[in-house]
Image (tube, grey):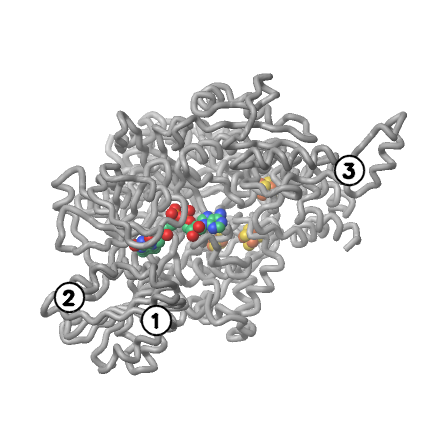
Amino acid sequence: MAAHKPRLAVFKFASCDGCQLQLLEAGDRLLELAERVEIDHFLEASSRVVPGPYDVGLVEGSITTADDAERIREIRRQCRFLVSIGACATAGGIQALRNWQRVDDFVGAVYATPAYIQTLATSTGIAEHVPVDFELRGCPVDRGQLLELLSAVLWGRKPHVPGHCVCVECKARGTVCVAVAKGIACLGPVTQAGCHALCPSHDRECFGCFGPSESPNLVSLTGFYERGGASRAALVRLVRSFNGHAPAFRAESDRLEGNE
Amino acid sequence: MTMASPWPTASHIDPWQTHSTRIAAIADETEGVRSYRLRFDDAAVGDAFRFAAGQFNMLYVPGVGEAAISISSDPEDVGTLTHTVRAVGNVTDALARLTVGDQVFVRGPFGTPWPVDRVMDRDVVFVAGGLGLASQRSAILRAALPGTCRHATVLHGAKRPGELLYTGEYDAWRRAGVTVATIVDEGGPAWNGRCGLVTALLDDAIDDPARTTVLCCGPDPMMVGVAEKAIDMGVSIDAIFLSLERTMACAAAHCGLCQFGPLFVCRDGPVLRYDRIGLLMKVPRL
Amino acid sequence: MQPPPIHSWHWLDASDLQAVIDALRGEGRRVIGPKVADGAVILGDLVSVAELPTGWLDEQDGGSYRLRQDPAAGSFDHVVGPHSLKNFLFPARETLVSFAREDGVWHEQAAAPPAAPLAVLGVRGCDLAALRIQDRVFLGNGFVDEAYRSRRERLFLVAVNCRRAVATCFCHSTGCGPAVEAGFDLALTEVDGRFACEVGSEEGARVLSEAGIVDAPLSTDEAETVRRVPHDLASRMHARQATDGVPRPRSLDTHGIRDLLMANPEHPRWDDVATRCLSCTNCTLVCPTCFCASVQEVTDLTGDHVDRERQWASCFSLDHSRMHGQPTRSTTSSRYRQWLTHKFAGWIDQFGTSGCTGCGRCITWCPVGIDVTEEIAAIRATDGVTVAREEASS
Ligand SMILES: Cc1cc2nc3c(=O)[nH]c(=O)nc-3n(C[C@H](O)[C@H](O)[C@H](O)COP(=O)(O)OP(=O)(O)OC[C@H]3O[C@@H](n4cnc5c(N)ncnc54)[C@H](O)[C@@H]3O)c2cc1C
Ligand code: SF4
Ligand code: SF4
Ligand code: SF4
């Protein structure tokens, strides 16, 4: 371990702050963390800001403006180990739905003076702009995984963040499969684990919050749901949400729409 | 149904039983490779800990994890164990951060040994690619003793001369009558030895194939190359033994991770006779 | 009271069954049994016979499970659901050992005291077969898994003879059911709203007398009729007749199955199934005999306390075969081959028995309905066909 306390910084781009809240609401474990690291930049928690460089940087949010694209480069320079956290930072987030539309049309429809709005045509994840050392998925990220990542970095070991799918968590907690027992189109078999099967354990389908799993076979899954009566439009909506712009999900919703 | 212990209670082996040891000495072998001499905290445990050449231990760094590592020391050296480890990831990097006096937990020994006690009238050819020599060192020390075998040869290949392992010991092995030959992929200007694949050394090493036993450890494709060449030269398929590597969590044929076809590398191996695995080794992605 | 002799038969009604549950709970056991939850018959904590799925039937097929009510259905006319004994004897996560650091020195912590002994009600022939298989894995291979052993040795089993099968059942092909022959403490056969109970062990006899049931023996004729119940079902399954209108049960030709699969590692069917298979792990996790696991370090931020936690693993995940940072079984095709070949062939080499009991869980709970019996039949039909090999060795 380094002689000095490792320095942690948390940054935000286009996002809802939900991932940062996972850290803020960690209670006792946040206090434990504060004993182990110097939290030098975390505007959501404190206005105390100590300038970089930092040992570990957590980045929430997606890149949607030219300024952001510049700011993330500077942050990369300041952080030894950079982690993108959440669906926005890893895949562009729900706001990446704009990537399928013309942003100028939205700007024209929403703002009185469209000329004041400076925005990129797309919402993209951090790794599309700078190299990232670790991507922590989720909408929001799972607090347990976030703390696991931080303790692994602190104690010099490999973090345990598996790439397998949500079904593993359903089976581990004994949740009855909603796809098999209720015929509900569930994204669990192609979505990375991390949520502890939150939705299936509440009788709802998985919405893909943690993005594509390590080897997703979307064509087979949506084909099975389609044969079971699901409409293509519904399947496109299912696949194209929080992580809709992640490559595997993006390719599938495009394929379902016949754009591929 | 409830059971009145149909399995032996006193003599069963609990694979999770760990032993605390301290690092007694560290030797830098090659870049990124160090040998750790471990001494058991409890001397009685150390005295009772016996292994055969070719077996391995699970080394545990608390909070980091476990790795399967061959025992490289002489089985007769009771009370201490030597492990030669390359730092490549989670556990092995953590080991590399430790110093003399630090604590390491050991469970073992596990797996099948090299058949060095069944080669009295035979020529034994050890073939090691890179760090594979670490799994053979204890067997080489046995083979160097008078009466163990007719003749022992060590063929060691590495990427670069600096990666040849245990170079400081070759003279001692040679004095004990062991032939040692080395070869590297890329020699560089200072190297005046041979360049090429370790299989090229077999030609000079095997002169009586019917009385030769080949013991090989290294990357899978290299081992297949050695075994096939030895067979071509006339060595019997059941006189060729390979030591396989697979990732494992328990070392007790419970976790299933090390399965190689129907074999558990931890229990049925790591040392396996080529007639049992030759076909399996040619199946892609098994 | 004198306990009844082993292999004696006794009539129980629902209140007697309740008395058995009470007796088991009374001696500190956790009683597990079938109950309806979340649209399926699961295994959960059972206090009362009123919680049993009386009047419920399940219909199962590839990727599909539905419950329906049927006034004629008894308490055990459903068959196996998503859970099995594995969930309790080899739980999805458990701490194997803990270590704590005091003054810079790590100590292995004393093991936690064992949990309450289990009693499981409603165990089928295929479940008992799966238990025998897991016993070989965890107890009979030279190493003993203490955690499993502690639960296993104290396990009390109330088995049930099936009188109904669903379309995913094929225990008649594997020889694992539907009749329960041995390995239980008590076995029930449901007949006209009553339960004919066979005593299978001294422990079973003791619990029965504890529950106050000793003198309601079956007549010889009655016992004969009751014994025929599962055998009649077996005949219907062999004839592949549907029971009560559901699709007919599957079947599997197990003849020479080990050699068949071992000889076909490069059969084109592996690539074919890989276009359908999701590598989602469900089949392996619901399978009552699959035993793969990984061990994770669970640390706190202080780093002074570590639990070594065993978690279910699956040959369908990339971590299962990761070596030098790369998965050896990098394709779904190679992973499906591992699952099927291990279960139906390699298992025979490893444990002297097939790994499959014919319970059908992997077929039902596969989200896309992939069917092991169909995949094996396809390979058998084209035994020896290979795809061109694109590389010499992995
Ligand atoms: C029977 C047996 C005997 C052995 N004997 C020895 C021995 O004597 N000496 C020895 O040094 N080794 C030996 N090994 C090998 C040793 O077990 C492994 O090197 C060790 O387990 C690695 O563990 P680790 O935690 O250090 O690395 P891990 O973190 O598990 O990583 C292993 C490898 O994967 C790579 N890697 C890990 N994660 C990733 C990722 N996400 N992306 C890309 N790459 C990744 C690492 O760089 C490394 O190359 C033996 C193995 C067996 C089975
Ligand atoms: S409910 Fe969804 S996530 Fe859970 S097992 Fe079924 S398909 Fe997988
Ligand atoms: S392979 Fe399928 S049918 Fe056979 S025991 Fe496992 S889950 Fe049951
Ligand atoms: S066979 Fe079915 S359950 Fe098994 S991994 Fe493939 S898709 Fe999942």
Residue C140, given in percent of the width and then of the height, sits at 28, 51
Position of residue A89 relative to residue C165, above or below, is above
Between disc 2 and disc 1, whose residue precedes?
2
Question: Which element type, helix, strand or loop, lies under badge 1?
Answer: helix
Along the viewing direction, whichever of B80 and C247 lies nearer the viewer? B80
**Spatial distance from mark 2 to mark 3, Cα to Cα?**
72 Å
Along the viewing direction, whichever of C76 and A23 lies nearer the viewer? A23
Q: Of the residues shown, which amino acid type is indicated by label 2?
A: Ala
Pointer 1 residue = B198
Q: Of the residues shown, which amino acid type is indicated by label 1?
A: Val
Whether residues under marks 2 and 1 lie with C-beta atoms below 8 angstroms apart, the answer is no
Along the viewing direction, whichever of C287 and A122 lies nearer the viewer? A122
* Side of A133 relative to B96 (left or right): right
Pointer 3 residue = A120
Q: Is residue B253 visible?
A: no
Residue positioned 23% across, 77% down in the render = B212
Kindly indicate the quadrant of the structure image that contains residue B229. Answer: bottom left
